[in-house]
Image: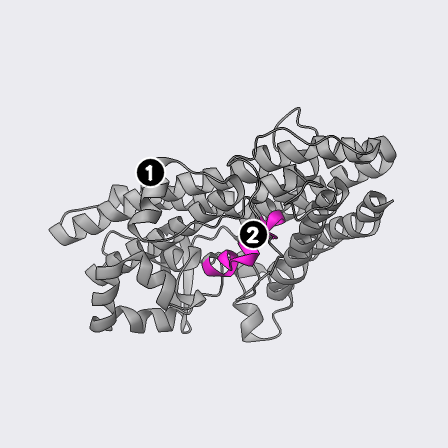
Amino acid sequence: MKKLFTMIGLIGMIGLIGTSCTGGNPEPTSDKEAALQQAATPYVNHTVVATYKAMADAGMELLANTQTILDRVEKGEGYTDLMITADANWRKMRKHWEQSEAFLYGPAGAHNIDPHIDSWPLDFNAMNALLHDSARMAQIEEEGGAYVGDKLGYALKGFHAAEYLLFESVEQGGRAVGTGRPHAANLTHAEAVYLNAIVEDLTQQAILLEYAWAGEVSADKMTLLEEAEIEPYEDRYGAQMINAGKAGSIYVSYQEVAEEIIAGAVDIASEVADLKLGNPYISSTAEERDYIESPYSCTSTEDFADNIRSIQHAYCGAQAGDYAISNYVYRQDADLDANVRKAIEEAIAAIAAIEDFENTAQGNPLVKTAIDKVSALEQILDDEVLPLLSK
């Protein structure tokens, strides 16, 4: 997600028949429409909904960790084991989120969930001031995630606020520099309260994403929303895609669905190349130098690679055997399909070759190579795949 940037999507709030995105498809109107229709259902169910479900599941696990950490802090008991487990669950939740960034259109953008949970850099000076504000901390302790969600700015919540409290950092030159190791089990009571409230809000937002696409979630997830008096979004966005061309869908055709999917992939490729990799590589200002996505867990390059995997899943399918846009492109131009697949693999490999990105990004030739490979992927999707779909 771009720093404090909202990707706005048009969402139709008209409900479709049924409450699940697994219903039957309408009759196709052309061979092209039939092929792209065949890609829509697995994309919705196996790529989008499955990713958001896994993210929300990991959030529920992380929330159980932070609730127990808070309980142990209040009792004066040790919790080193829980910090290690919580870090692992944060990474798992984070991975699913990063693998969703090719589909930030729709609910993630329309409801500002993207900037709500994934804005950076963290304003840790403001956060530390908040932790020492007894009146506001008393409100957070009483209201939990509701206070965080409604009354704190984007730079004080979400993945990166939780990351700062879960992972160790050291101060260098007035900056908090991460080590990637679990935070020592010495949180203050205020920090434990704040951490739990952040994770509660983060998990609620993940559940809202799952519900907005699938139209339903498990009972325990619904209970978490109901206890916080949060109404789920009735977008039923998955059904909108699967039922393209039918009354009530915002999509007039499966071609339009396919173009939306590829446009989402183009957007995240552009962001990875120009901002996530590009700003720290240039580092001509302090703001660009500090534009490190996951500086405390030191997982930035994992984030970037997972962003490209989100493109891979959108284009090729997330499960073996899924019919995907790649299959349609292959039928029209086998060489183009092979080139797209190659560009995806080369971008992931170039990102994986970068070591210690958080401390070596500026002027690093490996970062420049990764920028070029991701830009090449963006270009082939934008200049060749999208025009092919529009023919």
Tell me the residue at 35%/36% (across/down).
219
Q: Residue under circle 2?
A: 13
Seen from the viewer's position, the closer of residues 160 and 207 is 207
Q: Residue furthest top?
A: 321
The stretch drawn in magenta includes residue 380:
no
Tell me the residue at 14%/47% (across/down).
77
Tell me if residue 84 comes above or below residue 189 in the rendering: above
- What SS does tag 2 mark? loop
For residue 26, say whether it is visible: yes
Q: CA distance from mark 2 to mark 1?
A: 25 Å
Graded by Cα atoms within 10 Å as few (under 14), some (14 to 19) or many (20 or more), the crowding at tag 2 reads some
Q: Position of residue 382 (x, y in %)?
A: 78, 52
The span picked out in magenta is 101-116
Q: Quadrant of residue 123?
A: bottom left
Amino acid type at mark 2: Met
Q: Nearer the viewer, mark 2 or mark 1?
A: 2
Left or right of residue 158, residue 5 in this image: right
Q: Quadrant of residue 271?
A: bottom right
